[in-house]
Structures are given as C-alpha cells and as structure tokens.
Image (tube, rainbow, N blue to C red):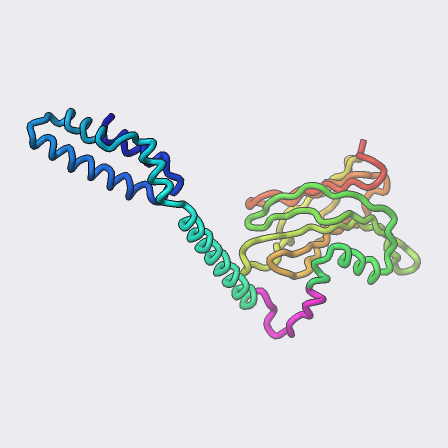
Amino acid sequence: MYRRQFCETVTRQLRCRWEAPAIRQELSDHIQDHQAALMATGMDRDAAEEAAVAAMGDPKELGRALDRAHSPWPWRLYHAALTAAVLLSGLALCLVLSNLFGSTSGLPPKDPCVALAEQDPEYIMEQYVRSQGDAVIDTGTVTGGGDIGPYSLSPVGEALLILRPGNGGDASTHLAFLVSSLHLQPWLGALVTDNLPCTVVDNRGNTYDPGRISFLYTGNSPRDLCRVFLEEPDPDARQFTFTLASDRGIAAFTVTLEGGDAP
C-alpha cells in the first residue's frame, strides 16, 4: 500500500471531517520522513515507501483510534452556534429594514391587535361581508398558486359567492377569495397587480373583462393578504380559473363552488 492510499483509508474512518486535512498531512509527513531515512540506508524509493507505510500498522484501526480522539461534537456545536448567530443577525436586520421602509411616513403606528386581526383570513372576509351588508349565497374551495418575481402567491381559506344589495333595490353578485403574497425582502411593498394581465375563464366558456376583476391588499409586509373579486360571475358556472401573468412569472387559482367539480 502506498502513502496516499494509506492516508485516505485512515481519514475515511473519521466522523469529524474538519480534522481530516490536518491529519492526512501529518500522516503523510511522517511516512515521508521514515521513507527518507530508509532510502538513506540504500533502500530504493518504492520499497522504502512500502516499508514506511507498513510500519504505521493497519490504516482502519489507526483511523478508528484517531476518530475516538477527535470527537466531531465540539465542531458540530460550534457550527450550530455560528449558524444560529447568523440567522438571528439576519432576522434583526430584516426587522430594522421593515421598520425603516415598511411603515407609512406621517401616519401613527397601527394597533398591534388590529394588525394581527388583519392577517386572519376569517376576520378579513367577515369584515368585508359585514361592512357591506352582503349575504353569502355560496362557498367554494380555492387551489393553485405560483411565483411572480420575489412574491410567492398561494390561496388562503375558502371562496365566497356574495350577494350585494345596490341602490334602488338592485343586487349584484361577487366572487371573492383571499391570496397570500409572501416575500423575503422586507424593503418591498405589496405586489402591484394593476399592471399585471389577469384573465378569468369559467367552466361554461365565459371569459371575463379585466374591468370586472379587482384586487385589494391589506398593506402588511412581508406577508400580505389580497382580496380578489370578480363582479357578476355567470350564476350557472361552478368553476373559475384566475391567471395572473407577467414576464416575472405566473400564478393561477381555481375556484370551485360547492356542488361538486365542474363538468
């Protein structure tokens, strides 16, 4: 067995991989010194190397002995502590940036209880219905999602088909659901959807004009909740697909009202 093979076999027994390079170099130096001494007595290079390696003993036994002497746990604890320190520093920086750039200048700070409530999907939808005097006439599930730039969009809670009273006794229906917009860059505001093409089609083949689709954000960061509305959906349609598309990505959501899957 040659010097390099011997050193590799020894260090493969080590659990503490951080110590391996130093141990490998120390073993190699020791074998080289012994080899040089044997060559000085007239032994040729290859024979001297083999003899010097053989004098070191069984490489696996030596490796296991060195492994017992070099426990990996101090290094693991060190790296765990270092990782935790980096994460905490990053969190502190995010909080500072959020305080600097995430608030509206000139306005008093929002009540924490109100801010927490505004992140509760049930609270948001309840407030919407109650404040407008609407009546829920159907509910449904929402699936899908996607990424648009740094924003990750996903549905939250259930969809509501709402009957809204109007002036003169007229009433209109609205399909509403919530979308979570999450990003990891606290200096960013809410996703601007005004310039994003949004298409809506239903299972009856209807395509809805963009003017009938609206978005309303709660204004929180980095996780924002957006209320999505479709005015006057086809009363016979059971499934609607909303698609937000841009050169930065696509997000699509499918709303299926109660009563089963769309045919």
**Front residue (pair 150, 77):** 77
Residue 26 seen by the camera = yes
Q: Reply above or below: 70 against 8.
A: below
Q: Where is residue 9 in the image (x, y as percent from the top left)?
A: 32, 31
The quarter holding residue 115 reads: bottom right
Left or right placement of residue 159 versus residue 25 in this view: right
Q: Reply above or below: 212 against 30.
A: below
**Front residue (pair 31, 87):** 31
The quarter holding residue 255 reads: top right
The quarter holding residue 216 reads: bottom right
Q: Residue at x 64, y 48 (%)?
A: 153
Q: Position of residue 112 (x, y in %)?
A: 68, 68
Is the C terminus in the top left, top right, bottom left or bottom right quadrant?
top right
**Front residue (pair 75, 96):** 75
Left or right placement of residue 222 versus residue 45 in this view: right
**Front residue (pair 51, 165):** 51
Residue lying farthest to the right in this orientation:
169
Q: Position of residue 116 (x, y in %)?
A: 69, 62
- The magenta stretch is 102-115
Q: Main secondary structure of the magenta part?
A: loop
Magenta run includes residue 141:
no
Q: Which residue is drawn at 84% across and 41% down?
A: 258
Q: Residue at x 28, y 34 (%)?
A: 7
Q: Position of residue 113 (x, y in %)?
A: 71, 67
